[in-house]
Amino acid sequence: MMSETAPERLGPMASSEDGEVEMCQAILPCHANHLGELSAGQLLKWIDTTACLAAERHAGVPCVTASVDDILFEETVRVGQIINIKAKVNRAFNTSMEVGVQVSVQDIYTGTQKCVCIAFSTFVGKPAGNEKVHLKPIKLWTVKDQMEYGLAAERRRIRLCHDNIFHNLIQDTHIIDGIACGKNSNAMTTDRSCVKSIELVLPPHANHHGNTFGGQIMAWMENIATVAASRFCCNHPILKSVDMFMFRGPSFIGDRLVFKAVVNNTFQKSLEVGVRVEAYNCEEWNKGKPRHINSAFLIYNSVNNKGDLMIFPSVEPTSKDDLRRFQGAIARRRIRLARKYILTHKEERSLSVDWDKTNQAYLSYTNVVNLTMLAAKSDWEIISSMDRIKAFVCEENDILSVMVEMKVKKRPEQAFLLLSDLQLRPSWDRHYLDPYILALTSVTLASVPPLPKYLRCETRCAGFLIYSDGPRNCKVSYYNQVTSNILPYIAGNLTGWSKSMEETASSCIQFLESSCE
């Protein structure tokens, strides 16, 4: 079922509703996998169809998919349920436009609706001749329209900067050296995950322009990626998110499409599969000269028989190509984390709790317990390594945490006394030079009410753990569960734009070692 908003004649500015399209589908067994769940490939077809029609509704000309990214699957859809797919143009740039797609699932018995995923597609108009199609801007009617309009520009900036950011992260050899040091005896190669498959493009696979339907290509790519992931983990993988589908060129009826997939890297409870698509016409097929038309990176996890997420073995690169893919996966994961928390971070409720002398001991005990539990997590992943400093991140239940580990030539008891005195912190942490107060655990004091001229940041869980590392040395580890207040200070580190965490840690080491005992 497909419905469109009522057509309306507009001036040079088109309303955001002008490109809005809605699709409803009842999930039948033919749409499901062996578990009775909606196939991700089928869902990708419907997403691409709806997004394309929304783009064409706005542009007034045929449109083609340039890329699809930022798809995070939050809910499983099963046979018998109903899904609703809404797509609209968030922003029209000069020759391209971003289409936002929201998918929800409805239970027919209770009427309850849940979000399945949100996707962002980039489309361009298909010109009749050689000239590019220039798009009209959209008109903003609501606050949400304005928010999406602004975020679309930020997402576009990240897409355009993606290659530069990616290459900068790849060239950061400290990151790779730090991770390579973490290999263990359980590491395994990805050779058994290599998959190669071929498809012949037939008329049913074409879109209404005569090209191969982009949604069909994405479905084929998802299928082969799932096979690669299952071969690696020897279990049924679950598609968690799509990093990016990149459409580099068209293919046509009669083309032979060769799909190649392999696991690039693992990250504790997730793994990345890379897929490459090459197209051949008859002449190219005989000469062995392919056209590289698509690439994609898909993220999977898997559950054991108890329903818990599996821990994947680490990957051991055995060739230059393995190492290239291994490093690329690390860089893309850092970009994904930054993109996710910069662009989709939600407003938080107040984290502070009321403090008075009666609950002082309880709050202190709870804070220590939370910090030690955070430090004990096994999912820490190194993102940077330099002389005496290592930085890690950990993501769990959509909460991002950071850890900075420092090797300090100072006895642990001395380091503890210096770090526990927050009045000394501005001497080594430049972030404390700003006019705001930050506690290791945020509390609300009646005697210190918020003031308009001060910026008050709240902390969920933060602090230091200090360990002895020899007679006169110690290891200082700083932890912070990231909140929206803290995110701006670490966003650059995630993408490689900044080294502020390492610089602050270096200042901390200098402060501790230069202080008199």
Image (cartoon, rainbow, N blue to C red):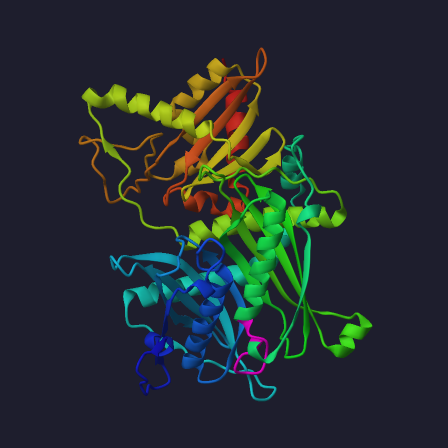
> Is 110 on the left-hand or right-hand side of 418?
left
Residue at 74%, 70% (x, y): give it: 290
Residue at 44%, 72% (x, y): give it: 51
> Is 425 on the left-hand or right-hand side of 443?
right
Residue at 57%, 75% (x, y): give it: 205
| Residue 92 in sight here | no
User: Who is closer to the viewer here, 237 or 291?
Assistant: 237
> Is 279 on the left-hand or right-hand side of 16?
right
- Measured from the top left, where is residue 46 in percent x and y? 45, 69
The prevailing secondary structure element of the residues shown in magenta is loop
Range covered by the magenta-colored residues: 205-214
Which picture quadrant has residue 387? top right
Q: Residue 459 colored magenta?
A: no
User: Who is closer to the viewer here, 405 or 331?
Assistant: 331
Vertical comparison of 243 with 394: above or below = below
Q: Residue furthest top?
A: 471
Residue at 49%, 27% (x, y): give it: 477
Vertical comparison of 342 with 456: above or below = below
